[in-house]
Image (cartoon, rainbow, N blue to C red):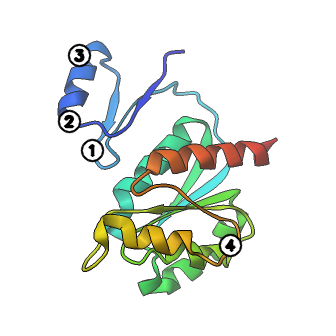
C-alpha cells in the first residue's frame, strides 16, 4: 500500500534502502525507517513519556511506531521522578490519554507513579541506560514488573516497538 516501517536501522542500512526507496525517511534518534502516505489519519491519544533525556531513543521508537499505525501521540519527555513537578503539570493530558507509554532506566519508577495517576493502561518500557548498578535495564525491568499500581504492563528492555504496537491496539479499542 505504498508504506513501509522499519526499526533498529543503522545509517548504513538507511543508505542501502534509500537506493530502492528514495522517499524513505530515517530518524537517527529512534533508528526508524518509514515511508507513509501524507494523508494518514490518526485517532485517539497515546501519551509517550520518558523519565530522562537518555530514554528518548526508546520512547521515540514507541511514539513513531504508534503514529505509523494510526495513533495520535503526545510526547512528555524528561518528566521522571527526580523532577516530578514537570510530570504533575501534565496530569490532565495523562488522564485524557487512552494509554500511556513510559520509558525509564535507572530504577524505573515512572511507570508506577503514572499508574497511580491515571485510570487507563500504562505500558512500561525499561531502558538499558542509567548510572551505577542499573544492570543494563534489568533494575528498571524488575521495578516495573513489581509495580503495585493497577493497569501497568511491561515489555522487554528497550522494546519501544512492542510498546508502540500494544499502545496502538489499546487506542484502537478506545476509538471504536
Q: CA distance from mark 2 to mark 4?
A: 38 Å
Q: Are marks 1 and 2 in contact (CB under 8 Å)?
A: yes
At mark 1, the secondary structure is loop
Read off the residue under disc 3: 19
Left or right: residue 163 versus residue 15 is right
Of mark 3 and mark 1, the one earlier in the sequence is: 3
Q: Position of residue 62 (x, y in %)?
A: 48, 49
Of mark 3 and mark 4, the one earlier in the sequence is: 3
Residue at image location 35% in from the left, 47% down from the top: 30
Q: Is residue 40 above or below residue 146?
A: above
At mark 3, the secondary structure is helix
Read off the residue under disc 4: 92
Residue farthest along the right direction in this orientation: 176
Read off the residue under disc 2: 11
Residue at image location 45% in from the left, 50% down from the top: 160
Q: Position of residue 90 (x, y in %)?
A: 59, 74
Between 142 and 76, the one nearer to me in the picture = 142
Read off the residue under disc 1: 28
Q: Position of residue 54 (x, y in %)?
A: 31, 66
Q: CA distance from mark 1 to mark 2?
A: 7 Å
Of mark 2 and mark 4, the one earlier in the sequence is: 2
Residue at image location 71% in from the left, 56% down from the top: 98
Q: CA distance from mark 4 to mark 1?
A: 31 Å
Q: Nearer the viewer, mark 4 or mark 1?
A: 1
Amino acid at each position: 500500500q505504498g508504506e513501509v516501517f522499519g526499526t533498529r536501522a543503522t545509517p548504513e542500512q538507511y543508505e542501502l534502502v534509500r537506493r530502492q526507496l528514495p522517499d524513505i525517511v530515517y530518524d537517527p534518534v529512534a533508528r526508524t525507517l518509514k515511508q507513509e502516505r501524507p494523508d494518514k489519519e490518526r485517532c485517539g491519544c497515546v501519551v509517550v513519556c520518558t523519565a530522562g533525556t537518555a530514554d528518548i531513543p526508546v520512547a521515540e521508537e514507541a511514539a513513531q511506531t504508534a503514529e505509523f499505525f494510526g495513533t495520535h501521540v503526545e510526547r512528555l519527555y524528561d518528566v521522571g521522578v527526580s523532577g516530578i513537578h514537570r510530570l504533575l503539570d501534565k496530569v490532565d493530558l495523562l488522564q485524557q490519554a487512552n494509554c500511556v507509554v513510559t520509558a525509564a532506566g535507572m530504577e524505573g519508577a515512572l511507570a508506577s507513579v503514572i499508574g497511580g495517576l491515571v485510570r487507563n493502561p500504562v505500558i512500561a518500557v525499561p531502558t538499558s541506560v542509567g548510572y551505577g548498578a542499573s544492570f543494563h535495564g534489568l533494575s528498571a525491568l524488575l521495578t516495573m514488573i513489581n509495580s503495585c499500581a493497577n493497569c501497568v504492563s511491561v515489555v522487554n528492555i528497550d522494546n519501544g516497538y512492542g510498546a508502540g504496537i500494544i499502545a496502538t491496539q489499546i487506542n484502537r479499542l478506545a476509538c471504536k
